[in-house]
Amino acid sequence: RIPFAWNNITLHATHPTTLRVHLTPTTPDTVRISATDETGQPVATIGELVLRPIGAEPQAADEGILLGVDWTPVRADEAGAPDVPVAAVIGTPGPELAAGLGGETVRHPDLAALFAAEGPLPQTVFLPVPAGRETRGALAYVLEAAQQWLAEGRSAGSRLVVVTTGAVATHRGDLLDDLAGAAVWGLVRATQTENPDAFVLLDLAPAEPADAAALAVAVSVTAEETQLALRQGTVYANRLARGAAADGVLTPPADTGAWRLGSTGKGTLENIALVPSPDATGPLAAGQVRVAVRAVGANFRDVLIALGSYPGEAPMGSEGAGVVLETGPGVTSLAVGDRVMGLFSDGAGPVAVTDHRTLGHVPAGWTFTEAAATPIVFLTAYYGLTDLAGLRAGERLLVHSAAGGVGMAATQIARHLGAEVYGTASPGKWDTLRALGFDDTHLANSRTLDFEQQFTTATQGHGFDVVLDSLAKEFVDATLRLQPHGGRFLEMGKADVRDPERVAQEHPGVAYRAFDLMEAGPERIQEMLGELRDLFEAGALHPLPVRSWDIRYARDAFRFLGQARHVGKVALSLPRELDPEGTVLITGATGTLGTLLAHHLVTT
């Protein structure tokens, strides 16, 4: 129960510094309050304080609803003049900010130069946090600027707008690229509590030029708002909102301790739910292992399963990493407490049971998230290139969708084997591949058929010895023509599987094979996990970049994955359950919240 309404308040005195307060229940939902000083003289009386219970769900439309901070679009009628007021910018603005600055914006190398200029200070002064600074340097830069700003007497009527890029998430699933900027937000928010009218925080979206009109709206509301963000031409302000923070968050079933990621229907990602998993609690059969799962890798196949578009029945989240809880009869390669990664046949949940032959030890120094994002992509690429294609040093390999998980893994493995690697990807991901060593000769667009002529020229008509394909229709036809002298064509996708005999007739010398990782069998999977671990620990291979969501935000993660916005891998982290036999330390536990938490830990 929390205070809801105060009625019949009378103040008798204002001088006491110590109060003795008496609370007298008058009904089950109300109390009367009297406050006196140390001598017993009345200070204040409150005839009635109404208390209301707060639960997980509101009792009525206007009762029992807790407020949370959420990003709210700024309406057009809240903004002032549409034009950007005369402003100044300190240092060199990034491309996102520069795109929205008006012609009247004056630039200064630093705050000292701004203060040295004649006349009043501009109403708005932008302070971009330079890109590429490490966190400590960015904090020192902003702290010094804030101190200079407060020390300048003329700054009282102006605001210093600290600009970051990709430092905060206005929507779940936003890409956050600026760790230093996120730390700057923490620093400036603390500074704003001491100087509420001096500073404004403004975050821009990475690689999204600021819309000039939206930037003008943001500037016009800085007198009322202290935390703003620009996304796709819309200005968002960080405000109190009713219950928005919990919208779309998945909740584990209350009637069972064993659950997994599943779906209540087909056709939409909104049906994704956390469902009971009775298979995780039964006795272990010979060769089985029970694992406390810490993280799960997500693949495009999981999106198809969630949408009901995947052929056959399969669980969502078939790879992960965690700690062995129990081993079944005949298991000697793993022991309780081992950190493991691999394939899970029952899907994604806090506890999973699987065949011990599909698990391997996590390389030293890895996080569970890195380990969970590794098995399927590296096993698929390794099995395809070594077991099926027999890729050799000096051969040419074409990897379609080279910025995807399997594509990035295949690139590493092929280069380790000594092959020359060519890749395709959408242009938005080319910078990622260039950072991985692809030059313009070895890189082409996966969204057009131009790669056929480009790679024909690059290879002087010889084409490729091995192709790792995930495209369809005319893109497959164009790729097959890039093997004029024959070769091995490995098809990973299931959207356009060809007949190997027909391919051999139309493209002499091309050995076509569509494959699936599970064809390798559990014994070979166990061997490959060991071989890959040796390569990782030797530094020959490296874990892929990965973006992680809490599993309770799986809908957002799958939506992000389905839109192909990711580079590398997507993973889901699982909340770690407390050990009932363990110990919990609660600091500051003598208050109401602490005692409630202690009671919950013991009883629940």
Image (cartoon, rainbow, N blue to C red):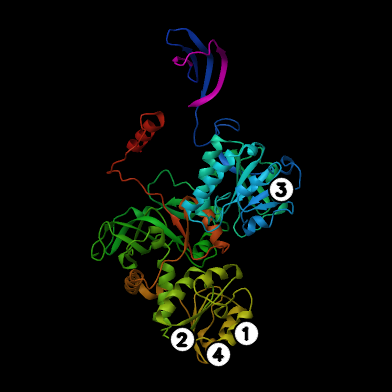
Identify the residue under disc 1.
453
- Hey, what amino acid is under mark 2? Glu
Q: Which mark is residue 507?
A: 4
Q: Position of residue 597 (x, y in %)?
A: 38, 35
Q: Looking at the figure, which quarter contains the C terminus?
A: top left
Q: State the SS at label 2.
A: loop
Q: CA distance from mark 1 to mark 2?
A: 20 Å
Q: Which mark is residue 193?
A: none
Identify the residue under disc 2.
395
Mark 1 vs 3, N-terminal side: 3
Q: Nearer the viewer, mark 2 or mark 4?
A: 2
Mark 2 vs 3, N-terminal side: 3
Q: Closest to the observer: 295 or 477?
A: 295
Identify the residue under disc 3.
216
Q: CA distance from mark 1 to mark 3?
A: 47 Å
Magenta stretch containing residue 591, yes or no? Answer: no
Q: Nearer the viewer, mark 2 or mark 3?
A: 3
Question: Is 495 above or below relative to 161?
Answer: below
Mark 2 vs 4, N-terminal side: 2
Q: Closest to the observer: 14 or 350?
A: 14
Mark 2 surroundings within 10 Å by alpha-carbon count, few (fewer than 14), some (14 through 19), many (20 or more): some
Q: Position of residue 287 (x, y in %)?
A: 28, 64
Q: CA distance from mark 2 to mark 3?
A: 56 Å
- Hey, what amino acid is under mark 3? Ala
